[in-house]
Amino acid sequence: MRCKYRRSSILRIKWEREASDKQVTHIGEHEITAYWKGSLSAQELVRLDEHIESCERCRALLFDAAPSCLLSGDPHVEYAALESWVNQTASAEERRNIEAHLEACASCREEAEDLRRLRGQMQQRRPWIKPAAIAAAILLAALAIWRFGKEPAPSLTIALRDNGRTVGLDSAGSLAGLESSDSDAAARIAGLLRGGKWDVQFPAGLTAPATSFLGPDGAATAFPLTTPLGKVVLDDRPVFSWNPLQGATYRVHVTDEQFQPVAESESLTLPTWQPAQRLPRGRLLLWQVAATRGSETTRAPQPPQPEARFYIATAEVGARIAAAQARTPVSRLELAMLYAEAGMRAECERELQLLAGENKGSPLIGRWLDEISNAKQ
């Protein structure tokens, strides 16, 4: 039942960076903790997702800090145990176990607070002991029904654990256990649970063939671009990054498919740039970096390397994903589906891997992962 963050493994890692890497803002321990507790804002979550997409070090830190209950499928604290903890009748060891779980489980923490408030109301009404006892019994029964109503219903024909709760299909084939403000999304999730195919919608032209691009033929790029490359992003002010070229200054050029200018950076000394203006959504965009050392200018990418393309999700898609991220608890299954529909393969696979951690050996999730991995871009 313990649900502690593995902070020791995080603290053991030494942040040894090259000169160029020192300027990159990596995620900190407080952001990692906030991520797994679900307290990041939608904007913060989007930026964190963008960073770990291209930063293997931070991605490893984030997953290493996953709560053990998420990875092992440990259950929530039973209602009777929460009641004994609130009433201070639990043993010292039981209290330690419960408090360790409450530290990372927002759902159980909320229920414990409900019980604590109820106990306070009962103590304030001692002159009316009998009526208070009756009311308390009714409230406790209602709370218990609500509590156990979140557990798997006997009539569920398909059930999965999803970020601490159970979702699935009831005997009528309807979605159960997942509340969503988007009724269409709920219907699509039910379809997936029934065995439907994942709708992976990659924007046309996102992956470019080898071609010439804004320059003459030349050798392999001396400073490869890193992100965004062949992907869909949510932020309309994405962070561009590339490998450094010793002693160079840089300029970033962003164009549309017809090579018409969209944005251009000032002269840069660091291998990263975020535009001040918002870039157009719902369009395929291309970018290139010109590195200058002395009188020599080198561009990346350059032939025979493919163009560096990316796509910014529409405002509607971004709003749907932000709404799903803001719900408590977040549904990994809903997010995975929305990411797939937006063409965000890596983000979809990440959410499905988290689901797989909660549902050890699930053939359904294994099939989903294979289907997403094999989707043609």
Image (tube, rainbow, N blue to C red):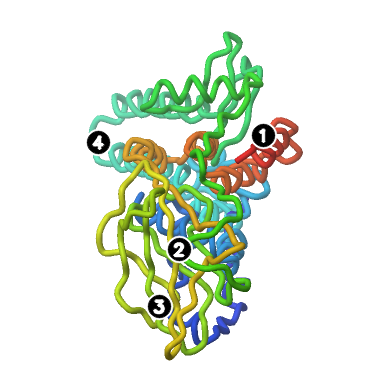
Q: In 3D space, how far apart are the residues under numbered discs 3 and 4 (Cα atoms)? A: 71 Å
> Which is nearer the N-term, disc 1 or disc 2?
2
Q: Which numbered disc, 4 or 1, marks the residue closer to the eye?
A: 1
Task: List x then y, in percent, for residue 242.
Answer: 50, 71
- For the residue pair 304 and 11, the one nearer the viewer reads as 304
Q: Which numbered disc, 3 or 1, marks the residue closer to the eye?
A: 3
Task: Please identify the quarter of the rendering in which residue 270 is found.
Answer: bottom left
Name the residue tied to disc 3. Answer: 250
Q: Secondary structure at mark 4?
A: loop
At label 4, the amino acid type is Arg
> Which is nearer the N-term, disc 2 or disc 3?
2
Name the residue tied to disc 2. Answer: 214
Q: Is residue 93 visible?
A: yes
- For the residue pair 7 and 192, the one nearer the viewer reads as 192
> Which is nearer the N-term, disc 4 or disc 2?
4
Name the residue tied to disc 1. Answer: 368
Q: Residues within 10 Å of mark 4 (few under 14, many from 20)?
A: few
